């Protein structure tokens, strides 16, 4: 008796991962182009918070499906990896932004010295 396996057709996780990547990349480029404007960070913070929440919920959903649907584990594992691939990109963007913020703070603190502190 042959069983016809339906392919695992859940595309929301891939769309979420790609969408999160595109929007975070646009915000990152906007921050770099705007010369480190804090206004971009104010806009980006709610997005980053929502993206972390949505991606976490999707990850738990995919893990649940990975456990339930043993015949589709390979497809689901690929979707989990696609979703998790945003983590290193986000860490890279975050570290670059923090380095820019630290550099700007150092420059700002050097320009605010009192006259008796200057050499």
Image: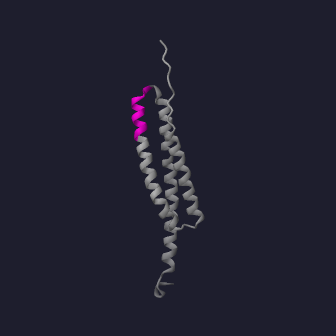
Front position in the image: 83 or 50 = 50
Q: Residue furthest right?
A: 33
Q: Position of residue 55 (x, y in %)?
A: 45, 46
In this rendering, the count of numbered labels is 0
Q: Position of residue 42 (x, y in %)?
A: 47, 64
Residue at image location 50% in from the left, 66% down from the top: 101
Q: Do we see residue 80 in this rendering?
A: yes
Q: Is residue 2 above or below residue 63?
A: above
Display coloring: one colour
Magenta stretch, overall SS:
helix
Q: Is residue 98 above or below residue 119?
A: above
Residue at image location 49% in from the left, 62% down from the top: 43
**Residue range highlighted in magenta:** 60-70
Front position in the image: 36 or 45 = 45
Q: Is residue 77 above or below residue 5?
A: below
Q: Residue furthest top?
A: 1
Q: Residue furthest bottom?
A: 116
Q: Is residue 95 above or below residue 118?
A: above
Q: Position of residue 6 (x, y in %)?
A: 50, 25
Residue at image location 50% in from the left, 47% down from the top: 86
Residue at image location 46% in from the left, 55% down from the top: 48
* 76 magenta-colored: no
Q: Do we see residue 98 in this rendering?
A: no
Front position in the image: 94 or 71 = 71
Q: Position of residue 81 (x, y in %)?
A: 49, 39
């Amino acid at each position: 008796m042959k069983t016809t396996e339906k392919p695992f057709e859940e595309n929301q996780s891939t769309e979420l991962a790609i969408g999160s990547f595109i929007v975070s990349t646009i915000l990152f480029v906007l921050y770099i182009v705007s010369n480190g404007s804090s206004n971009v960070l104010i806009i980006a913070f709610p997005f980053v918070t929502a993206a972390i929440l949505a991606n976490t919920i999707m990850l738990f959903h995919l893990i649940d499906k990975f456990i339930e649907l043993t015949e589709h584990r390979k497809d689901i594992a690929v979707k989990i990896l696609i979703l998790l691939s945003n983590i290193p990109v986000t860490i890279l963007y975050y570290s670059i932004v923090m380095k820019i913020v630290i550099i700007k703070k150092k420059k700002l603190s050097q320009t605010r010295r009192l006259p008796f502190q200057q050499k």
